[in-house]
Amino acid sequence: MQDSGEPDQNSSSPSSVPERVLVVGASSGIGASLVRQLAQEGCQVAALARREDRLAELAEGAPPGSVHVYPHDVMDAGDVPALLERIVEDLGGLDTLCYVAGVMPMVGPQEYDHDQDRTMVRVNLLGGMAWCAEVARLFLSERRGTIVGVSSVAGERGRRMNPAYHASKAGFTTYLESLRNRLEGHGVRVVTILPGMVSTDMTAGIDKLVWPITPEQAAKTMISTWRGSFWSTRYMPLRWCLVMRVIREIPSRIFRHLNI
């Protein structure tokens, strides 16, 4: 848990102009909930995901003209510059980026699948880096804006369950911290979101969820976090901050024998 200690640098445009938000990974879970809540508030939302049918449903269920859909696979990093330019033109600018895209296939105890691992790294880490870097370049030129990245408490330690997933989230958390430090003093805010277990399609294969929250709860917390100035890193729910502090202190020789 970190207190940014900074004055409010919320990137919202003047009150006469709706907040313009880009949500990457918008077709389900937290991303879809973000789109719905922001659209209902009157924001202009660019919704990106692979599944065009899900994006169309989001747009149809939102206030007219509030949701702009863009089919996109985050593994196609080369498409990012041109697509961002198009989105900025369509929305008349950009205030906030939310990178929510992520995959977590179930991995068997004796399963070692490099193709599957590579997909997790490309989506969870490299896709986030591609979007955050391009948006950071834009925001740096304007000396304003907010970048929000959804990582996970799963990146806090290397657990046995899914090595590539934990590594990808650890990498994204570190990348966001580095980006935050790099943009310090330039008017650009970077917020890291560290959810525990969220009841989504991604966690449907897990037998027992610990302290699960709904995508709607997660989205509401995220919105209030980036619009405030207190948090630079936010655990959801907050109790995970204390839990992970303890877990990080467990020596590796002990941790490797724990089924957590």
Image (cartoon, helix red, strand yellow):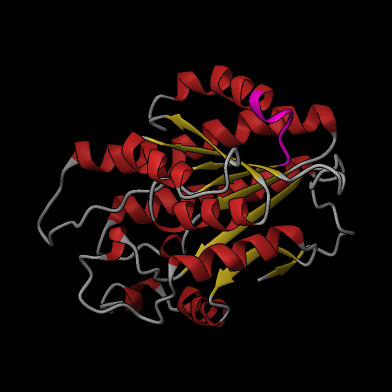
- What residue occupies the far left of the structure in this picture? 110
Residue 61: x and y in percent read 46, 50
Q: Is residue 91 magenta?
A: yes
Q: Residue drawn 29% across and 72% down?
A: 256
Q: Residue drawn 40% across and 48% down?
A: 168
| Left or right placement of residue 113 versus residue 30 in this view | left
Q: Quarter holding the C terminus? A: bottom left
Residue 123: x and y in percent read 38, 39
Q: Is residue 234 magenta?
A: no
Viewer-side residue, 224 vs 81: 224
| Left or right placement of residue 202 versus residue 66 in this view | left
Viewer-side residue, 42 vs 97: 42
Q: Quarter holding the N terminus? A: bottom right
Asked whether the viewer can see residue 196, the reply is yes
Residue 82: x and y in percent read 56, 16
| Left or right placement of residue 195 versus residue 203 in this view | right
Q: Main secondary structure of the magenta part?
A: loop
Asked whether the viewer can see residue 173, the reply is no
- The answer to whether residue 150 is above or below residue 119 is below
Residue 110: x and y in percent read 9, 57
Viewer-side residue, 153 vs 203: 203
Q: Residue drawn 41% across and 29% down?
A: 71
Q: Quadrant of residue 126?
A: top left
| Left or right placement of residue 115 versus residue 240 in this view | left
Q: Residue drawn 47% across and 18% down?
A: 78
Residue segment shown in magenta? 90-95
